[in-house]
Image (cartoon, rainbow, N blue to C red):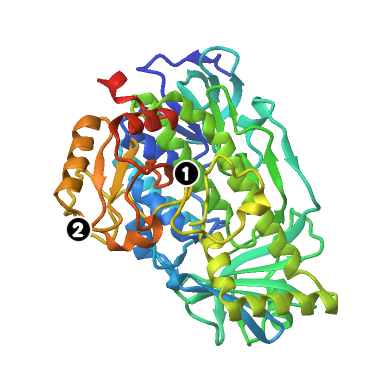
């Protein structure tokens, strides 16, 4: 083996370890911000595996930042609803098609390898490439910069001094282990056999379906070409054995309330639904994202989506700090914000899994009655749909109780909540108030100040906006969004200035359009002070 050599080419890059969807998303976002990135992965460059196949609306919104949302939405199968069956009865459905505050009122069912192909193509367009079969074998985080030892396919080793290092290398993360971060967990493993194959029968063509009865639980999702993702609970299994077609067919016959015949499977595996969260998501200049930071039940298909939220949350902060458009303090919020969100997802998916597997008649009757009642009252749509679509993620600093965070969204919205404003594909930095589109655009690399009149916009209002715009330019773009009537239900009827982060979450609300107050607010939330940036 060749001794390790130091890499000395150019400035210290951000080193991303792991080139799955999450790792490539963060690499793309950083490259788009002109930040040097290297992305390595121990696995070969191609895979036929499709472990994660569902993408929810919030993920697509965030993927607009790197310019892949439209292609993904064109090539994937749109899922209009998620239906729940108990025995032969349809209890209710989460209707994504009824979401009115997103450009993507649907789920997306796409094999993971296709998703990776789209993102990898964008990575190359941005000047990046995946260094496949290149493994992290050691990590020294004791100095002012992390130093990683990489082993290349030919056996040679290279020591890379990274500006920042991001572990996106899955549940068995080498980065996490090298950092000495414990992977904490609770509860027993729940096993699911999953596979992809053709399914023939009167299945809903545009719905993801969960079926429960005394015989077990099963989930079905259409890819749109006659093939489906099939998943069923199994009591025990040897991880070395691939689940056969017969196992899935037996479950289809026993659990699903309509006839369905399964053809030859393209791929199968067993997934262990565990609840594990890293004790820390950050160690100095090293971060954990995706499955390296947290894993939970496959119920609701939240894993990859939560990882994409991690990636974007970290990318705009890391990019802004590196480029000087936001204060370094914002990096301190990554662990708290994403840990809270991961714990909420973990709780919700664990509850869905346990509720789906209950067999005692009294508990089944209670579950079914609660779901039916929620459907009749509209609570199912108003509460559960934002949870599954991940549009209800809240980054308010006072959201400590995960259970309390699962609630109705209040209107007008408060600090920490997602505001339906979006970075446009190919966004060029314009802030003209007459910009076309259903939602106003925000800056993708710094905090944007939105002004909202709450009603009439007279000459005096325009003068106040222009005064604010002049005082805060060019470091903090100011947009008057009073003309967007769709925002009224979110912002209310009173004048206000809303400070919005690059990911669309509300950082602060100021009822007065006062320059001094807004500068203080911008400083408090971690935006670079205009006077310091001048």
Residue 234 seen by the camera: yes
Which quarter of the figure has residue 172?
top right
Q: Is residue 15 above or below residue 208?
A: above
Instruction: Indicate the position of residue 338 as horizontal and vertical percent values.
Output: 56, 41
**Which of the numbered marks, if any, corresponds to residue 45?**
1
Q: Residue at x 47, y 45 (%)?
A: 415
Q: Nearer the viewer, residue 411 or 54?
A: 411
Left or right, 67 with reference to 198: left
Front disc: 2 or 1: 2
Look at mark 2 in the image and give the residue it sits on.
436
State the SS at label 2: loop
Q: Residue at x 72, y 78 (%)?
A: 368
Which quarter of the figure has residue 317?
top left
Which quarter of the figure has residue 82?
bottom right
Q: Nearer the viewer, residue 188 or 459?
A: 459
Left or right, 222 with reference to 513: right
Label 2 Cα neighbours within 10 Å, binned few <14 / some 14-19 / many ≥20: few
């Amino acid at each position: 083996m060749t001794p390790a050599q130091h890499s000395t080419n150019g400035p210290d890059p951000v080193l991303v370890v792991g080139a799955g969807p999450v790792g490539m998303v963060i690499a793309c976002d950083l490259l788009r911000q002109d930040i040097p990135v290297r992305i390595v992965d121990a696995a070969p460059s191609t895979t036929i595996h499709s472990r994660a196949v569902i993408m929810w609306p919030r993920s697509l919104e965030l993927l607009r930042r790197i310019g892949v949302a439209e292609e993904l939405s064109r090539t994937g199968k749109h899922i209009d609803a998620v239906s729940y069956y108990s025995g032969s009865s349809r209890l209710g459905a989460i209707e994504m098609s009824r979401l009115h505050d997103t450009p993507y009122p649907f789920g997306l069912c796409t094999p993971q390898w296709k998703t990776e192909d789209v993102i990898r193509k964008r990575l190359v367009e941005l000047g990046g490439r995946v260094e496949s079969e290149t493994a992290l074998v050691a990590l020294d985080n004791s100095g002012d910069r992390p130093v990683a030892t990489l082993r290349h396919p030919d056996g040679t080793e290279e020591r890379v001094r990274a500006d920042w290092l991001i572990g996106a290398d899955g549940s068995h993360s080498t980065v996490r282990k090298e950092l000495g971060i414990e992977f904490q967990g609770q509860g027993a493993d729940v096993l699911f056999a999953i596979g992809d194959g053709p399914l023939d029968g009167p299945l809903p063509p545009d719905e993801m379906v969960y079926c429960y009865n005394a015989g077990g639980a099963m989930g079905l999702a259409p890819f749109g070409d006659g093939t489906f993702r099939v998943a069923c609970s199994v009591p025990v299994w040897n991880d070395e054995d691939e689940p056969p077609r017969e196992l899935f067919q037996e479950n289809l016959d026993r659990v699903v309330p309509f006839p369905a015949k399964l053809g030859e499977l393209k791929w199968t595996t067993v997934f262990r639904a565990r609840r594990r969260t890293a004790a820390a998501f950050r160690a100095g200049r090293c971060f954990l994202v995706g499955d390296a930071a947290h894993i939970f039940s496959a119920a609701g298909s939240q894993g990859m989506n939560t990882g994409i939220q991690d990636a974007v949350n970290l990318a705009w902060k890391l990019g802004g700090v590196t480029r000087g458009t936001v204060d370094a303090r914002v990096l301190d919020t990554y662990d708290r914000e994403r840990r809270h969100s991961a714990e909420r997802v973990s709780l919700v998916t664990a509850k869905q899994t346990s509720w789906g597997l209950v067999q005692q008649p009294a508990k089944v009757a209670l579950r079914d009655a609660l779901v039916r009642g929620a459907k009749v009252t509209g609570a199912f749509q108003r509460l559960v749909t934002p949870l599954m679509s991940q549009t209800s993620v809240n980054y308010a600093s006072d959201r400590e109780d995960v259970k309390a965070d699962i609630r109705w969204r209040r209107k007008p919205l408060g600090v920490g909540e997602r505001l339906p404003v979006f970075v446009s594909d190919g966004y060029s930095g314009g802030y003209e108030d007459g910009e076309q589109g259903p939602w106003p655009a925000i800056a993708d690399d710094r905090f944007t100040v939105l002004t909202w009149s709450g009603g009439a916009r007279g000459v005096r209002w325009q003068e106040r906006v222009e005064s604010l715009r002049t005082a805060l330019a060019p470091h903090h773009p100011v947009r008057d969004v009073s003309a967007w009537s769709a925002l009224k239900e979110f912002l209310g009827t009173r004048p206000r200035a809303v400070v919005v982060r690059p990911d669309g979450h509300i950082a602060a609300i100021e009822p007065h359009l006062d320059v001094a107050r807004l500068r203080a607010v911008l400083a408090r939330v971690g935006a670079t002070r205009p006077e310091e940036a001048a």
